[in-house]
Amino acid sequence: MNFVESRSLEFEYIKYDDETDSKMSVKALRGVDIDVKKGEFVAVLGRNGSGKSTFAKLINGLNTPSGGTLYVNGLDSSKEDNIWDIRQNVGIVFQNPDNQIIATIVEEDIAFGPENLGMEPSRIVKNVDMALKAVSMEEYRNAAPAYLSGGQKQRIAIAGILAMKPDCIILDEPTAMLDPQGRKEVMDTITMLNKDEGITIILITHYMEEAALADRIAVMNEGRIAMQGRPVEIFTRVEEMRSLHLDVPQITELAYAIHQKKPEFPKDILNIEEFIDAFKYIGCADDFSYVKENKAVKYNKPILEIKNLTHVYGMGTAFEKVAVKDIDLTVGKGDLIGLIGHTGSGKSTLIQHMNALVKADAGNVYFKGKDIFEDKAGLKFIRQKIGLVFQYPEYQIFETTIYDEVAYGPKNCGLSAEEIDIRVKDALKFVGIDESMYKKSPFDLSGGQKRRVAIAGILAMKPEILILDEPMAGLDPYGRDEILMNIKKMHDDLGITVILVSHSMEDIAAIADKIIVMNKGSVAMYDSVDNVFKEPDRLTSMGLNAPQLTLLFKRLRKEMGLDVPINVYDVDEAANILISAMN
Amino acid sequence: MNITLGQYYPVDSVIHRLDARAKILATIIYIIAVFCADGIAGYGLCIAFLAAVTVLCKVPFRLMLRSLKSIIFIIIFTVALNMLFIRTGTEIFSFGFIHITTGGVLTAVRLCVRLIMLITGSSILTLVTTPIALTEGIERLLRPFKKIGVPSHEIAMMMSIALRFIPTLIEELDKIKKAQMARGADFDTGGLVKRAKAMIPLLVPLFVSAFRRADELAMAMEARCYRGDINRTKMRELVYGKRDIYALGIVILLTICVILLRILL
């Protein structure tokens, strides 16, 4: 018998519409058929709202099926009596680490599940020991979760599930809020649990590279399973994946692009190792050489200058922490700069200084040559000219209509009603929100739409510099692309100077001209995209990474002596170069 | 972000290892002792006891002083008030309407010492007990009252969740405030009505977020088989050991001595 067996599984819930004051039933699942074998690692992909999380909650018994059947470990999940056995057997790890840790001490949190099961205290201690060891967090046994990094918190959440000795763990976008280092920690833990402990894993994710590690992928769309198969089978259906608002790993995309022009090159490739093997098999011309000049760095007229900036949190207390130290930076007018750095590297503190939200303990920030703190009454003007979009900006939404939400900023600037109206309409149009939506509540929108409204709220203030803190976090691949293209358009069409904070090196490489690398509170590098990504090892040592294509080309140079440039970030360009290099 | 209640100082000491219930009861008895204390001998005894516990619990002295920082104004205020208005004993200083007497100084010093002893004593409780153990201790102490309808488990669970989420929500509020300031919000100027109105952009997102967090947390707890007090065990079951009985014995002895001293002297 399979561990999970679902047949035409349905789930619907009642939604209340405030406007019409009517009830409406929404079908989140419309007949899901899937089997998961014991010990298998299954990745579930799907755009936002495709029913992935609903499905996860059904398997764990948090939701009860409204139609069809679902057997978990041989137990019928529609029977109330089985719920507790199922929940013990199938643990679930959620996206936000902060909202699933219950206790203030690590070991007490891990013990929470076993305690609920009524285990003997001596057995709880044994299970907690085992779980801490499994996620390599033994030394943090007595730590307070608040002081751990995101990756560590998620490992604690996994340990909390492990201590209940489950056969299966479901992870619902466990890495969405983590930096590259934290993502790697969590993914290593998951694969280890699957390979060494034989635990069945169901991983919901928006990261295609993570899904590629699974034994099997199930793609969900509109409450159904749209595709199912091994990662190579799924990811080689590039067009179909795109039509479902999804993506494929960049390396697979590259292999696919080459395969289309040169069919002897295999398209079923998931990672760099496989790519290199395939490339070696086909062979390349010995005397091949392709030189691509580094993109010339434009030095624009300075618009924002930061001199000797230092900021210390909790100065003089036991919790004193230097957030940023001796930062010197110049941002040119019209630049599009990527800002990267591990969690806690000082990125957030740095950008909050740029529009005077935080006052420096030492050093100055100059906007167009003028110290931004010089004139306290001018702070509003500064914040209007230097817009800052916080992470998860939709969490700051408060108005009753979309229109009013976007008008909040311009209103605070003291503009005339006509001017506000023009700006609100322009901003919403720019982010693709239709006029028919203006009177709707922003709280009713989907995640991606909410985010675009929130960004429009800043855009309507007509900033000259726009700083965005991970504006793509938590969105599905399609939503990510949409925001990314919007940002590029703001820069190109509206002439806004942009600083983009992101954990995705591919996204930065796709649109930025220059990159600032923050490490431990200092600027480690500030150079052109080509020069920064030239040193992947240095980036790795700072908990970062280089884009997949750069890593691949670097390996091709090293292992095959192939003279290819490493400053290629576009899949089609990379495919053309490699095709011409092949025999 | 200093929530004194969450100031647990993690070291291993005789005091740390005591049962949470014993620590709570001992603190209550100690407070009674302090209130009963009178005269140098009584105060001396209490101070000696406090000093002994301070040394035994291995918490740095400055951490205890920090808890005093928050009440420094109350101390100064009471001291000043007593010195100014108590007119017993002989006068030692006078300037205009200010008359300071030996009686006033004595009362002020006494009150000041008493306040310091109370605050330091109770802050030791929070320094040597994890918030979870503390709530658990309260739960167990309240358990006998369950029969008359006191939901001891629920109270304890709510307290520990509140403790866990206060820092998170403070952080969240700070983030929302900055985000609205980035949209030109102004929280510091204008009249009362304007300022109250300016709070809406802070409070709506904060409540929305608190509800979202509560919802997610409830789900995470349910997913980990939480169903209230039914069939629940504890990893560290509170058990009264010999040392807990000794500890309580010592505090009770202290109180008796203090009372005897008061009667005898």
Image: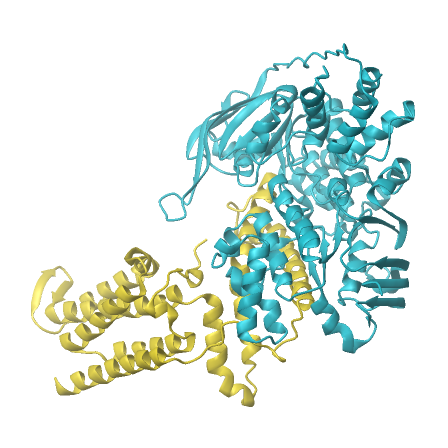
Chain colours: A cyan, B yellow
Q: Nearer the viewer, residue B203 or A29?
A: A29
Residue B43 visible in the snapshot: yes
**Labels in figure, total:** 0
Which residue is at 60% across, 77% downward? Answer: B232
Residue A537 at x, y percent in the picture = 59, 28
On the picture, is A65 further left or further right than B64? right
Which residue is at 69% across, 19% downward? Answer: A557
- Residue A399, compared with residue A331, is above or below; it is below
Residue A210 at x, y percent in the picture = 73, 43
Which residue is at 88% across, 60% downward? Answer: A27
Which residue is at 50% across, 78% downward? Answer: B139
Q: Quadrant of residue A118?
A: bottom right
- Residue B9, compared with residue A286, is above or below; it is below
Residue A103 visible in the snapshot: no
Residue A416 at x, y percent in the picture = 69, 35
On the picture, is A100 further left or further right than A404? left
Q: Quadrant of residue A393?
A: top right
